[in-house]
Image (cartoon, helix red, strand yellow):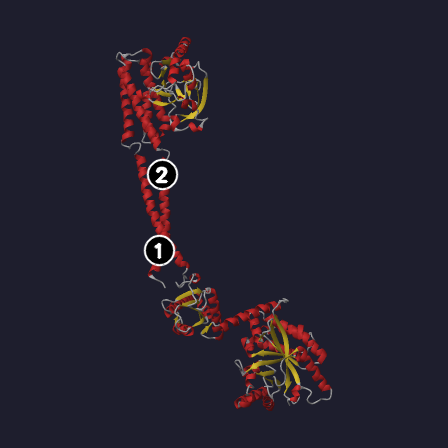
Amino acid sequence: MVPSSIPSARSSILLATAICLFFFQSTTSAAQESFLPNLEIVFGDEQAVVELRASDLDHLPQQSIETHSPYYKGSVEFSGPILADLLNSVAGGDIEDNTRISLYALNNYFVHTTVGELKDVDALLATRKEGDRLSIRERGPYWVILPLSEREELDSEHYHKLMVWQLYKIRLGDQHDRD
Amino acid sequence: MIGTESTLLYRLFSHRVTFSVFVLTCFLILVIGFSFYEGRNRADISLSGLRLASWSLAQFRDEARSFEREIILADTRIAQPVKLKIRYDVLWSRFEYLLTSDETYAVRRFNDNVAEIKHLFTRFKALDPIVSGLARNGIAENPLRQLRNNWTPIHAGIDQVVIDNLIGGESGNLTQQFDQDLNQVSRIRTLLLVMLSAGLVYFLFALIYLKKQFKTDPLTGLPNRHFLSQKRAVTENDLYLVCEIKSFQAIQTDHGDSETDGLIRESARKLAGCISETDTLVHLSYGEFVIIRRDTSTDPARAAQKILDRSSFDWKTEHSTVPIQFAMGADPGNPELTENRSWRIRHTNALRALGYSLNKGADLTIADDNLISEYQFKRKVLRELVHFFRGHTLSDLSLSLVYQPIVRVDRNKTIAGAEVLLRCRLGDGTSVPPNIIVDICEHHRLGKVFGEWLLKQIATEASQILAAARFKGFLSINLNPSLISNELPALLEATVFAAGLKPENICLEITEDNASIEFDSTVPILQGLKALGVSIALDDFGTGYSSLEYLQKLQIDKLKIDRNFVNQIESNAAREHFLKGIIDITHLLDVETVVEGVENKVQWDIVARHQADFVQGYYAHKPMEFAPFLSLLVSKLTETTAPREIGQHPADLLN
């Protein structure tokens, strides 16, 4: 069973790859970034894999969220692209809400959800904390941040589990059974 | 009446037991409160908190292993220094997560995890330069060995922390305290259930006890007023008796409260012994007992008398023995009634009968229709009297004066004076005897008002007598007890004297009963009146506790011999001797006699023969209203001034 979203995703792979190439050409890697793993975006059939470096993400429209969380004291400002925007730009068009998505962390944590839910919760793919690039020690390189302070209903375990830190891989499409 | 069950109940709710229950309850509340307080300290750790803590510990171990694996791989061909660094950082962030995140609070709450983890973290941080160096510069043997040597104990420490928390070490695992709390809560729950059940049972007993107490008099243990209020407590088939210790107030005054309490308890026992099991004895108010007698096969009077006969006893106190007798009033039921009357009606009737007993010094009175209607009649008269004296125009009662002439015992029956009598009629025409009016007035503090009214009324009418008839005789006025006071001279002054009567026109009649009430205070008042020139007559001589002493001490001027001495005197020689004796003695004492109740010529002649001074009776004149009396006086006046015509006056015709 292949969801209807996949063909459209597949058809836009070329475009995505083109964008990536553009990104690769235009970025210069900083010294500390060499330790940061790239963000892999895998499409369902694993035939298409897009790898993005942290600096690549800076080219997408940046948003910031200032929020508290169970993971640190006080309120902290995070910035980075909206996760849905990133996915759309990589897929080269709007991804349908019911498309399955899995987020994987360096520490072997993962979570399965849908693109729609991540859109609903205004998930931000944070690359920076208080303006500084997130290190792995600070749960970078990518941290899915939800606006918990702004939207109190998100401050529950059900949504906390979506706040994947040390994110390094995103898988799109109905491929969960293989994990 | 006091059964073992009540005793048990009584003990169950004695001060000691109720206080113990109170203390126990307080203790329980404290224990439960304390345990909840204790639990509250741990309440911040939820089951999901424990789950997250377990998860984070599992991750801790995993991440340590991943780092370990990279170290192992470091000197192989597939070594990836960058990955070593990544694993190191991942583990670093885990340390921080364990030490700071809200989600790992439970880990920090238990054992000495914080210190242990901090200690491991410090040592772990020290590896940073080595790891960074390896990552930056590639794998070198020395730093790698150093890393391995330093890492191995840290790794062991991490494993130890995880195992201690999940499986349990010296200080127990994560969930141990939680389990203990759960056990405690379940024990408390059981305890609560048991205590609540016990409390419920106690509460039920309390209800029964209260219900019983509600209907029980604490002094005697007998049923009380509330018992009587119950439905069918008193039916028309029952005889309702009220009894009271005779002279109870005097006894109470003599012996004081606590001894009297004992008397009441003993009376209760005694009376309880005099009734059958089906009967009920009620202690209604202090010293007032009610007996509901269910057996109506015997005549009420006999049944009540039987109880009375057996109930007298000698009450032995510390210093004396007091014979105790009861007085009783009874209200027999009326089985013909379709509905039971309220106990209050029965009680009122019985109480009236008791009042009658006490007044008459009798032991027992049965409330019959006469007694009840007499009470009701008196109540009506009283109500109307109050209206009358308050000047209500709608009073259903009218008081007026009538005059009965008192004549000299001579051929002409010369009118020497008249006794002012009271006439009272109700709206329906019934006349009320004057003595009842006086009684009621005296009993209900109307005596003074009544006396004043009487004197004012006399004053009003006397002024006419003086004007029209040039009256020179005396008016005999009955003094009701309330009038005999120091205020009487002033009152006379303000009324009859002000109207023009001279003191010699006034004769005040007192009865032996009045005089005997307060002999000591009466004598000076009478002396004061005599000093004014008023004469004093002793009324109804021979009916009360007559004593010749009165004649002397009271210094009376006239003695009114009661009609009983004259009644049928013509056929009773002994009476005649008696009358003669009295008249002789009074003459010796210089007291004039007025013989009452002379109704025929034979009697008149006897009285005349023994030289009585005055006669008041139908043979001379009947009592008459003011107008006829006035015209009688006027006619006598013309008689004395005009030539006398024999047979002019009806009384003369009888001569």
What mark, if any, has residue B38 been given in the picture? 2
Residue B619 seen in the figure:
yes
Rendered image quadrant of residue B271: bottom left
Identify the residue at horizontal 36%, vertical 35% (top origin).
B42
What mark, if any, has residue B478 been given in the picture? none
Residue A74 seen in the figure:
no
Q: Secondary structure at mark 2?
A: helix
Rendered image quadrant of residue B117: top left
Mark 2 crowd level (few <14, some 14–19, many ≥20, 10 Å Cα): few
Instruction: Tell me, yes or no, whether dots 2 and 1 are on the same chain.
Output: yes
What mark, if any, has residue B12 been given in the picture? 1
Tell whether A81 sits left or right of B374.
left
Rendered image quadrant of residue A144: top left
Q: In which chain is the residue bearing label 2?
A: B
Mark 1 crowd level (few <14, some 14–19, many ≥20, 10 Å Cα): some
Residue B311, x across and y down, in percent = 39, 72
Instruction: Name the residue nearer the viewer: B599 or B218.
Output: B599
Q: Earlier in the sequence, mark 2 or mark 1?
A: 1
Task: Give the CA separation, mark 2 to mark 1.
Answer: 35 Å
Circle 2: residue type: Glu
The quadrant in which the N terminus of chain B is found is bottom left
Residue B510, x across and y down, in percent = 58, 78
Residue B10, x across and y down, in percent = 36, 58
Q: Secondary structure at mark 1?
A: helix
Residue B40, x across and y down, in percent = 37, 37
Q: Are marks 2 and 1 in contact (CB under 8 Å)?
A: no
Tell whether A144 sits left or right of B544.
left
